[in-house]
Image (cartoon, rainbow, N blue to C red):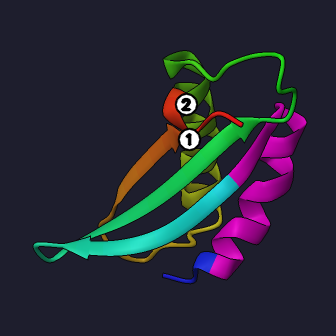
Amino acid sequence: MDTKKIKEEILNPLKEKGFLILDLKEKTIEGKKILEITIDKIEKKERMSTKDCQIASKIIEEILDEKQLINQRYYLVVFSKGIENED
């Protein structure tokens, strides 16, 4: 899994929808590949919602599938940084 390439491919489409990538990492838990992506809104006035994570997840899934960036089974986890991490 080339996380650098994945980040390059999803960066602008997410930005166009008002999201930025805070972190992107690959994990393996019990033999299962997991792609974890932490996002936030560009406009800090608005808080991230579950719906926002769903929207971002759909964008990411479509790009990963269309460009075949991951050639194995994986789990995609998209989440926000959380209220406890607010600046």
- Judging by the rendered image, the residue that carries numbered circle 2 is 53
Q: Look at mark 1 in the image and give the residue it sits on.
A: 81
Mark 2 is on which residue type? Cys
Label 2 SS: helix
Point 33% across, 64% down: residue:
74
Mark 2 or 1, closer to the camera: 1
Query: In the image, residue 54 lies at what x, y percent?
Result: 52, 27
Q: Compared with residue 22, is residue 51 higher up or lower down, i.e. above or below?
A: above
Q: Is residue 19 magenta?
A: yes
Q: Out of 69 and 86, give the one closest to the viewer.
A: 86
On the rendered structure, is 46 left or right of 48? right
Q: Residue at x 43, y 63 (%)?
A: 35
Spot occupied by residue 82 in the image (x, y as percentages of width and height): 52, 33
The image shows residue 2, relative to residue 66, as above or below, that is below
Q: Which of 43 and 70 is in front in this view?
A: 43
| 52 to 32, vertically: above or below | above
Give me the residue at 49% from left, 20% from top. 50
Give the magenta range: 4-21
Q: What element carries label 1?
A: loop
Give the tally of numbered discs. 2
Label 1 CA crowd tier, 10 Å (few <14, some 14–19, many 20+): some
Residue type, label 1: Lys
Q: How far apart are marks 2 and 1 (CA)?
A: 11 Å
**For mark 2, does the 10 Å Cα neighbourhood hold few (<14), some (14 to 19), or many (20 or more) residues?**
many
Q: Left or right: where does residue 75 sit relative to residue 41? A: left
The extreme left residue here reads: 30
